[in-house]
Image (cartoon, rainbow, N blue to C red):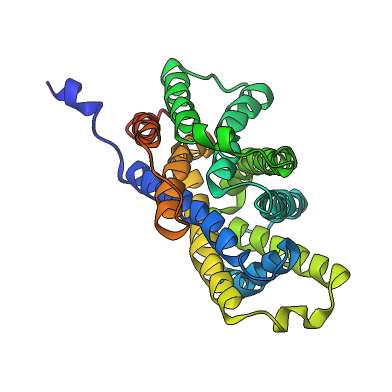
Amino acid sequence: MNQFFAGFFFTRQHVYGVMFALLSAVGFSAKAIFVKLAYLEAVDAITLLALRMAFSVPFFVLAIWFGNRDSKREPMQQRDWLAVLVLGFIGYYLASFLDFLGLQYISAGLERLILFLYPTMVVLISAIVFRHRVGKTVMLALLLSYAGIVLVFLHDFGVQQEDGVLVGGGLVFASALAYAVYLVGAGHTIARIGAMRFTAYAMTVACLAALVQFALTHPLGGLMVQSGRVYGLSLAMALLSTVLPAFTLAAAMRRIGSMQTSLIGAIGPVATIYLAYWFLGETLSLVQFVGSVLVLAGVLMISLRRQKN
């Protein structure tokens, strides 16, 4: 009897990892809502991204400062600094920039559908590069999750006829690929240097890259002439969809690994459906509800799957 119930009990670290992964998924999903609301104003993707990063960078610099006060930490090696630079640029700057550009052309719902192909990309990259075995449970969870996502956003494919859909879809697909590369690389780097330290440095790299891009393409005073609505949305995006999910994502990967974290992230599109319904006035149909149930079923299969050592 004890052996039967043992499979349903999880370590505290695993439970925390699942919770952090869910918080991260919902927080990152809300980004699309903030972006679409901000685009109602006269603001472009580069300016909006720069504002998001400008509001975010003080928190990451502060995290670096507090982290460096710990004398017990081992110093970072050259390969660690290189990983921080490359992964921070690809995973948080490049992926965000491509996503912001794509959202100029497609809806928040379609953006989530394409962006959340990244768990599949993570599984495939991990299988090819690190020879990770993809079990039947993971494959079934993927099938359920993505069948649900397709159902949830099926109507978007029918109503989106604008010329920019292919351009926007391609940009968001490239964003998903960049994010998948980040997740795979970050999982191994975090194991060496720690989740909080890696996230703080990587996000600082991304913030600086976004601000440099703005400085090279826009007048420096452009950040000071935006509307109060744009500033408010940018601040909310920085806190709720950048700082909080960045740290919870790193904490989740440290506890349950990059593959399981990315699969739990499939709940993101479901969160976007309801956020878009509440804040953007997008429809919520029976097909979307059924798809949401399938996605949640896949996510629960991953969340309740006992972590193997």
Look at the image and tell me whether residue 295 can be seen. Answer: yes
Identity of the residue furthest to the right in this view: 216
Residue located 46% across and 50% down the image: 282
Residue located 77% across and 51% down the image: 82
- Residue 96, image x and y in percent? 67, 54
Q: Is residue 274 above or below residue 294?
A: below
Total labels: the figure holds: 0
Can you say which quadrant of the picture contains the C terminus? top left
Residue located 67% across and 58% down the image: 202
- Residue 26, image x and y in percent? 44, 51
Look at the image and tell me whether residue 21 can be seen. Answer: no
* 146 with respect to 222 (left or right): left
Q: Is residue 221 above or below residue 151?
A: below
- Residue 120, image x and y in percent? 57, 29
- Of 221 and 94, nearer the camera is 221
Q: Is residue 5 above or below residue 20?
A: above
Q: Quadrant of residue 73?
A: bottom right
- Of 272 and 298, nearer the camera is 272
Identity of the residue furthest to the top in this view: 136
* 85 with respect to 202 (left or right): right
- Of 34 and 157, nearer the camera is 157
Q: Quadrant of residue 167?
A: top right
Q: Is residue 241 above or below residue 222?
A: above
Can you say which quadrant of the picture contains the N terminus? top left
- Residue 113, image x and y in percent? 55, 38
